[in-house]
Amino acid sequence: MLVTVALGGCITVNAPEKPIVIELNVNIRQEVIYRLAEDAGNTIEDNADIF
């Protein structure tokens, strides 16, 4: 306990000078195209007489 009290004032936490940058390169193009293709297929099936 004596060691904890002695070291209590020695611990400091400083923020970094530069901001932390997290780059998330997520490719959502494939999912969007898949959903559009599925919706288009459903529309064509539902309205076959128009196409």
Image (tube, rainbow, N blue to C red):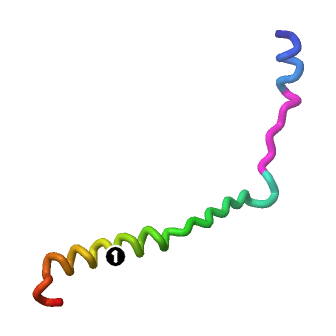
Q: Position of residue 48 (x, y in %)?
A: 14, 83
- Residue that sits furthest to the bottom in the current view: 51
State which quarter of the image contains the N terminus.
Answer: top right
Queried whether the magenta region covers residue 20, the answer comes back as: no
The residue depicted at 39 percent of the width and 71 percent of the height is 34
Give residue 38's quadrant in the image: bottom left
The answer to which of 11 and 49 lies nearer the viewer is 49
The answer to which of 17 and 26 lies nearer the viewer is 26
Q: Which residue is mark 1?
A: 37
Residue 17 against residue 7 in the figure, above or below:
below
Q: Position of residue 41 (x, y in %)?
A: 26, 76
Query: Crowdedness of circle 1 by 10 Å Cα count: few (<14), some, many (20+)?
Result: few
The answer to which of 7 and 29 lies nearer the viewer is 29
- Dot 1 falls on a residue whose secondary structure is helix
The residue depicted at 20 percent of the width and 78 percent of the height is 43
Q: Position of residue 29 (x, y in %)?
A: 48, 73
Give residue 25's quadrant in the image: bottom right
Residue 12 against residue 2 in the figure, above or below:
below
Magenta-drawn stretch, dominant element (helix, strand or loop): loop
Give residue 31's quadrant in the image: bottom left
Residue 12 in the figure: left or right of residue 31: right
Instruction: Find the magenta span and give its range.
Output: 9-15
Queried whether the magenta region covers residue 13, the answer comes back as: yes
State which quarter of the image contains the C terminus.
Answer: bottom left
Residue 13 in the figure: left or right of residue 51: right
**Amino acid at the residue labelled 1:** Ala
The residue depicted at 72 percent of the width and 57 percent of the height is 20
The residue depicted at 34 percent of the width and 75 percent of the height is 36
